[in-house]
Amino acid sequence: MKKGGLLSASLVCANPLRIDDDVDELIKGKVDMIHFDVMDGHFVTRYGLFPEILSALKKKCNIPVDVHMMVENPEDYISTFKEAGADYYNVHVEGCSQLHRCIKKIQNAGMRPGVALNPATPINSLEWIINDIQMVVLMAINPGIVGHKLIPNMIDKISALRKYSSEKGNSELLIEIDGGVTFESASMMLKAGADVLVCGTGTIFRPHEDSISNKISSLRSIL
């Protein structure tokens, strides 16, 4: 996959009563990826999407899906989401007691492994696995909360991660930013070194303003 300026649509922000129509709009808008949030009510205090939704999605389109596991013990669900069609499987450092083992299981299952970091989690928590992963999901807001504003010093964290991954020998690492992506912040994030922007209610899922496909086009035009 190419690097830089990729848009990943946050499916949890779609209208749950017309999710099929919203996916049609994502296809029409030629979104680069679909961000698939899974939440268990424990790691974060809300619930997300189900593997059955992912299975139906992959039957409808071939857009790459990055699954974001905001759950305790994400290792338990590797085979489930592989069978459902996940392309990237991102686990939180904070919720995974055996991170290296989990990453190896993701690789062995045939998915691309990634790690997610909460805002306060330091980059050096990636020290021993940085060359085993293909994506880092940097949370720019606290996880599990839709619509919160960007934590400003996360821009510096993007730059620090870009430098860190290059110094450690993983210059191809995809840096994905989850939370706080708006028409105003998107360019700053890419300039700091981000590759993928998770697009939700701050950008493309704004039905009171315009269609999803038109919002994708509008966002691309300023990047």
Image (cartoon, rainbow, N blue to C red):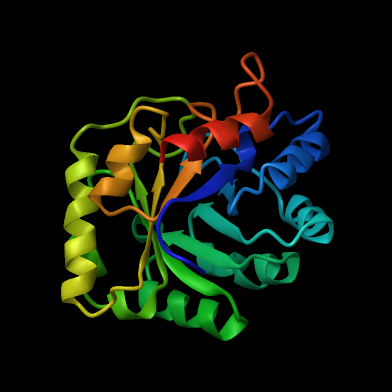
User: In the image shown, does 30 or 115 lie closer to the viewer?
Assistant: 30
- Please say if 143 is above or below 82: above
- When asked about the image quadrant of residue 187, the answer is top left
Residue at point 67%, 35% (across, down): 213
- When asked about the image quadrant of residue 185, the answer is top left
Q: Residue 200: where, in percent of width, then height?
A: 54, 34
**Residue reaching furthest bottom?**
108
- When asked about the image quadrant of residue 137, the answer is bottom left
Q: Residue 156: where, in percent of width, then height?
A: 17, 45
Residue at point 22%, 32% (across, down): 152
**Residue reaching furthest front?**
221
Regarding residue 53, the answer to whether it shows in the image is yes
75 lies left or right of 114: right
Q: Residue 188: where, in percent of width, then height?
A: 28, 39
Q: Residue 54: where, in percent of width, then height?
A: 73, 55
Q: Quadrant of the C terminus?
A: top left
**Residue reaching furthest top?**
208
User: In the image shown, does 40 or 26 lie closer to the viewer?
Assistant: 26
User: In the image shown, does 164 or 71 lie closer to the viewer?
Assistant: 164
Residue at point 66%, 48% (across, down): 30
- Please say if 168 is above or below 28: below
151 lies left or right of 86: left
Residue at point 48%, 26% (across, down): 202
Regarding residue 122, the answer to whether it shows in the image is no
